[in-house]
């Protein structure tokens, strides 16, 4: 049976001499696995697109509607997904979320033959199914960040959030070759069925192994719990089941929240160029072969997989040295301003042997900074981390939605260098918004009360609970 919170806290206070267990790192590994699955299930349609287009004689514009359906569902349901994460906890929310999107991923293979197709046609059926895949995946990132908030202490929130970004890098790197190989051997439908089946297995494993907080996990010993809670008391690890509604009024009146979400809108714009146009840019502008383009198209994701954990480590270390406000800001500034410089330089260099690695590193440094955005959601509100994460990710995906449209316009009208230079300017804007973000100021009511001296206690000094 899982240990109770009281038992766990008593054991921690007893100062057990046993070596700490490592369950919290395994939980972070589970988060990486789930995020890898999300990218497997969102990128597979792009690889299958050619086969679907040929089989059903779809125009490029029609196929574009199929592609964009996922992102629409994903963006629209970020806030509801975050609300569920706070209300049900990350464990239950993600279990339901994985099962949902896995079922509809598998149904993508049969969408042209579903009864729905008789009413809305093949395209309408594909659009509907992919929209519902996006609805399911919408809760994944907010729910994962909710789990991070419960398992990682105040001094390790960014490194915990980096496991989500790590999953993006790994998923983005392995999906194209794996799915392409499967489609070539067994047809495009096989990949969707296989991805759906894999998702159901991962959902079962997630629900069996993961818990919302270390106090609930039977594998956590008192020494590990003491280490986790050294900078984040168990009572602040948040109220799954509390049934309170997110304080939207307080959030939306916070300068830090607005700067955070607008900064993430600007972060989403450049990174979605890598998700959508980068392969075409490599082939048509840098004149690579299809095989070469496939290889170099994976390099931004490899850079993300390497630099995201480094960004989380740097953000936490800087926060311990300079405080939450300056520490988080410095991590974003380093990542975003360096990313902008590399994109700007890379777009103007004629040598593709130098330009492409610079552009790939620009993508990696973008996500170096992104880990701090997610950590700041926990810093600003532990009680409603998932709700704030959903709000932030809504803006990020709106930036992502705008990115391929505006990039295509700029590239067609003014050239690819202008399109990439504009992305560099937007990247700078993302960093500039962080002059207004103060991650040391918690929005949670209990933390605000703790920071205010009690009446009649003139000698009491105010402290920031999130520091």
Image (tube, rainbow, N blue to C red):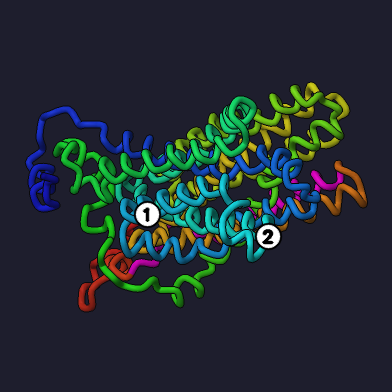
Tell whether 408 sits left or right of 131: right
Rendered image: mark on residue 96: 1
Rendered image: mark on residue 121: 2
Q: Residue at x 34, y 53 (%)?
A: 90
* 56, 230: nearer the viewer: 56
Q: Residue at x 60, y 40 (%)?
A: 44
Classified by dominant secondary structure, the portion drawn in magenta counts as helix
Q: Is 440 located above or below residue 15 in the figure?
A: below
Residue 155 position within the rendered picture, expressed as x and y whole percent measured from the top left: 36, 44
- Within the magenta stretch, is there residue 423? yes
Query: What is the tally of numbered marks visible in this picture?
Result: 2
Residue 438 position within the rendered picture, expressed as x and y whole percent measured from the top left: 49, 59
Q: Residue at x 14, y 45 (%)?
A: 2
Q: CA distance from mark 1 to mark 2?
A: 29 Å
* 41, 243: nearer the viewer: 41
Residue 325 position within the rendered picture, expressed as x and y whole percent measured from the top left: 47, 54
Q: Is 464 located above or below residue 174 in the figure?
A: below
Magenta part of the protein: which range? 417-444
Q: Is residue 226 visible?
A: yes
Residue 195 position within the rendered picture, expressed as x and y whole percent measured from the top left: 49, 38
Q: Residue at x 76, y 55 (%)?
A: 62
């Amino acid at each position: 049976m899982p240990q109770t919170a009281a038992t766990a806290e008593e054991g921690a206070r007893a100062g057990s001499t046993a070596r700490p267990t490592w369950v919290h790192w395994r939980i972070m590994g589970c988060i990486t696995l789930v995020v890898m699955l999300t990218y497997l299930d969102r990128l597979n349609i792009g690889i299958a697109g050619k086969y679907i287009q040929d089989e059903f004689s779809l125009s490029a514009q029609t196929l574009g509607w199929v592609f964009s359906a996922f992102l629409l569902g994903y963006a629209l349901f970020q806030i509801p997904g975050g609300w569920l994460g706070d209300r049900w906890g990350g464990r239950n929310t993600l279990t339901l979320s994985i099962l949902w999107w896995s079922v509809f991923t598998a149904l993508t293979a049969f969408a042209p033959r579903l009864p729905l197709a008789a009413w809305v046609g093949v395209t309408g059926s594909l659009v509907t199914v992919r929209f519902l895949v996006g609805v399911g995946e919408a809760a994944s990132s907010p729910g994962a960040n909710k789990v991070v908030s419960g398992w990682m202490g105040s001094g390790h929130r960014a490194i915990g959030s980096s496991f989500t970004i790590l999953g993006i890098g790994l998923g983005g790197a392995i999906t194209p070759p794996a799915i392409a190989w499967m489609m070539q051997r067994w047809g495009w439908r096989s990949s969707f069925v296989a991805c759906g089946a894999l998702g159901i297995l991962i959902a079962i494993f997630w629900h069996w192994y993961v818990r919302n907080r270390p106090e609930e996990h039977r594998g956590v010993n008192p020494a590990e719990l003491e280490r986790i809670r050294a900078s984040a008391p168990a009572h602040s690890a948040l109220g799954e089941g509390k049934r309170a509604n997110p304080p939207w009024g307080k959030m939306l009146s916070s300068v830090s929240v607005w700067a955070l979400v607008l900064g993430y809108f600007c972060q989403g714009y450049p990174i979605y160029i890598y998700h959508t146009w980068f392969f075409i840019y490599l082939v048509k502008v840098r004149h690579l072969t299809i095989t070469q383009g496939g290889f170099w198209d994976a390099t931004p994701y490899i850079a993300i997989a390497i630099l995201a954990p480094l960004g989380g480590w740097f953000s936490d270390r800087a926060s311990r040295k300079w405080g939450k406000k300056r520490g988080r800001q410095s991590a974003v500034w380093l990542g975003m301003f360096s990313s902008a410089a590399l994109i700007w330089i890379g777009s103007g260099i004629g040598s593709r042997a130098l330009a492409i690695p610079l552009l790939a590193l620009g993508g990696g440094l973008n996500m170096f900074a992104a880990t701090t955005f997610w950590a700041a959601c926990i810093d600003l509100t532990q009680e409603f981390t998932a709700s704030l994460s959903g709000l932030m990710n809504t803006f990020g995906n709106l930036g992502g939605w705008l990115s391929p449209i505006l990039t295509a316009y700029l590239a067609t009208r003014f050239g690819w260098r202008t399109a990439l230079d504009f992305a560099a300017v937007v990247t700078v804007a993302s960093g500039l918004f962080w002059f207004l973000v103060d991650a040391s100021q918690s929005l949670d009511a209990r933390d605000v009360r703790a920071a205010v001296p009690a009446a009649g206690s003139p000698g009491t000094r105010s402290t920031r609970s999130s520091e």
